Image (cartoon, helix red, strand yellow):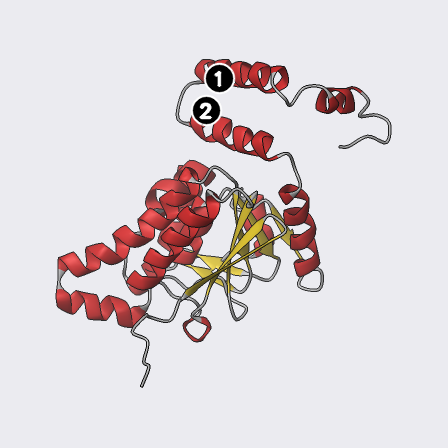
Amino acid sequence: GNVSTTPTPVVEVTVADAIATITLNRPEQMNAITVELGEQLRRALAESSIRADVNVVVVRGSGGNFCAGGDFAEVERLRAVGADGLRELFVNFSLACAEVARSPVPVIAVVEGVAMAGGFEFMQAADIVLVREDARIADNHIRFGQIPGGGSTQRLPRIVGRQRALGLLLSGARLSGGEAVDLGLAYAAWPAETFEADVQAFVGALAQRRRDAVICIKKLVLQGLGTDLDAGLAAELDAVVAHIGGDAGGDGVRAFGTRDSAGPR
């Protein structure tokens, strides 16, 4: 018969209203990470983020969970193959996380249910995280006698500080959505009842913003974090003069000047 040898996509992409939605699609395995999922996620991020009709990229999980981390069966299979096999799993996922910073447009993680280990590590890499209040978030590697391989020992202390990072990593403690916001690991936490509507309102508004302004702001923030304050401020100054001096002037500046009236906010 006509049997396709193409593997079933474990990452699905849809584009509508300037939003690319990337969905991790292994619901029975809580969207656990395999070599294939890491590779497909990286490719989906790379291809979606450079589309002219995409202003924002959303990453979420199917079946009510974000991602439970590395797939146990996959790790066991790769252990039998040897170090090179294991390396491929972690390199693929690391490249997917790194793709967030390479994306010119914002990448938003929409987190519900379980976000453990690698799932929690992707949250740390995302530009903005929107989380359901009842989400279950943890770096639980230590509970299995394991160490993180998706960035937690490096990104987490940079986000929450050394003390909290070591506390979370060495306890395996579970965080709620609200606690993730309090620690700076997420931007907003919303209740289950309104979560989808709240996410849609936030992402929908962002998708309608002026695209070059959004891209420039993300670029300035990410570049600035990698340099000193004076260099970052100089880059911002150059950018704002170029932006207003170009075709972003006129209407935008007039609207800004009348922002106390009914103009855009």
Residue depicted at x 43% and y 27%: 223
Q: Please name the residue that numbered disc 2 is placed on.
A: 224
- Distance from label 1 to label 2 (Cα)? 8 Å
Residue 49: x and y, percent? 47, 44
In this picture, is 185 found above or below 215? below
- The local secondary structure at tag 2 comes to helix
Q: Please name the residue that numbered disc 1 is placed on.
A: 235
Q: Say which quadrant the C terminus sits in.
A: top right
- The local secondary structure at tag 1 comes to helix
Residue 71: x and y, percent? 33, 67
Residue depicted at x 21% and y 70%: 77
Residue 253: x and y, percent? 72, 20
Asked if the residues shown at circle 1 and circle 2 are in contact, with their CB atoms under 8 angstroms apart, the answer is: yes
Amino acid type assigned to the residue bearing label 2 in the image: Gly
Left/right of residue 213 with respect to residue 219 in the rendered view: right
Residue 10: x and y, percent? 40, 66
In the foreground, 190 or 257: 257
